[in-house]
Image (cartoon, rainbow, N blue to C red):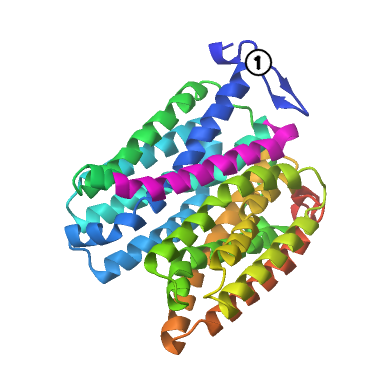
Amino acid sequence: MSVLTQGTTRGRAGGTTGSLAWLLVLGIILAAMNLRTAVTSVGPVLDQISSGLGMSGVGVGLLTTLPVLIFASVGAVTPALARKVGEHRLLLLALLTLGTGLLIRAMVGSAEVFLFSSALALSGGAVGNVLIPTLIKRHFPGRAGTMTTVYTTALAVGTMLAAAATVPIQRATEGNWHVALGVWAALAAVAAIPWLALSRSEPERDMGVNGLGPRVLVRSRLAWAVAAYFGTQSMVAYIMFGFLPKILIDGGYTAGQAGLVLGVFTAIGIPVSMIVPWLSSKFSDQRPVVVTFVLFYTVGFLGLWLAPAGPAWLFAALVGVAMGSFPLALTMLALRTRTPEATAALSAFGQSTGYLIAGAGPLVVGVMHETTGGWTLPFLLLFAVVAVQLATGWYAGRSRYLEDERILTA
């Protein structure tokens, strides 16, 4: 018995307990804080990066599209990698890959190498996206809601921290964007420490559910409902983060005011992430929560569309609360499955497919706005996306399990 497992017990209902459980909680928190730093640290200094590296418009477009491409492709193969390497060891490798990519891109002077190292860092984040819900289901099956709250809150904090602190770090280092990006590699290195210890206590896995791969899940209505729900909420998020400031400025706000509203919009995600998984896991049926978020979306979008010069912070706050559909989608991955192996399969399929769906949103909105010069068509698209979210969330939110579908016996 290893030192880590001494004084540790595992119950069928309660999952991992004792010293190992606390180390897992710490590891999940630190890992989650790193999953979006490769994405949100770039945006605030994108102009300096593109000019410093001589990056073309095509390169900038590729850089902003990389997260969707990497999250979808690498996320899809994560369960297979976990079966071969082990979940703890794979997350350790993912964090080391993430940190290596962040460090390389902070040191280079080539646009091509910057793009490659960004893809490397994002690959580590993509693995973490799929693995952490699986680890929560495996080690904390009786506390999935509480642990998903911990996970999504840490994810929101890390996302906001990288977005908010990169520019101040750059200014403190006399405009050096290399340092501003490089510091996030240190956070990844710290996050790897608990998983270095946990790699010696790899959990046993049920090898009887390995057949639940993409070819099987593509026939599952529940898997498609979860994927579509995840994809629609991600599409709304990408559109809002990309275009909310522009909507407000066109409505009469100054750039500073628009930035402040965006900050409020982003910050709301932290308390929402703390409440939604815990609350939704208290009930077997999550459809009332799905409907509530759709109502918030609808009122918020109507306000931003019809009265952009009005109390935009209020309408943006309503949309920000509705963005609780993201932690709800992550919670469903555990609530709609019985086993960690099924959670891994559903997580990979739902997130990979969902990110591919979401990636088209900002591009379509950009074309619509440029073609019409207004926001009517983009908002009509948002309402259509929310309608799809309601339909798919209504199906995915009902109490049922992936393993009970006939696809497993077909």
The quarter of the picture where residue 61 lies is: bottom left
In depth, the one of 383 and 66 nearer the eye is: 383
- Measured along the vertical axis of the image, is residue 62 above or below residue 33? below
Q: Quadrant of the N terminus?
A: top right
Q: Quadrant of the C terminus?
A: bottom right
Residue 206 can be seen in this image: no
Callout 1 amino acid:
Thr
Residue 54 is situated, as x and y percent measured from the top left of the image, at: 17, 63
- Which residue ends up furthest to the front in the rendered image? 310
Magenta segment range? 140-168
Lateral position of residue 187 relative to residue 393, left or right: left
Residue at 29% over, 59% down: 46
Residue 146 is situated, as x and y percent measured from the top left of the image, at: 69, 36
Lateral position of residue 336 relative to residue 63, left or right: right
In depth, the one of 163 and 352 nearer the eye is: 163
Residue 386 is situated, as x and y percent measured from the top left of the image, at: 66, 70
Residue at 26% over, 53% down: 114
Lateral position of residue 137 relative to residue 361, left or right: right
Pointer 1 residue:
8
Residue at 61% over, 37% down: 150
- Measured along the vertical axis of the image, is residue 373 above or below residue 360? below
- Label 1 environment density (alpha carbons within 10 Å; few <14, some 14–19, many ≥20): few
Lateral position of residue 313 relative to residue 221, left or right: left
Q: How many marks?
A: 1
- Measured along the vertical axis of the image, is residue 165 above or below residue 47? above
In depth, the one of 228 and 276 nearer the eye is: 276
Residue 57 is situated, as x and y percent measured from the top left of the image, at: 27, 70
Q: Secondary structure at mark 1?
A: loop
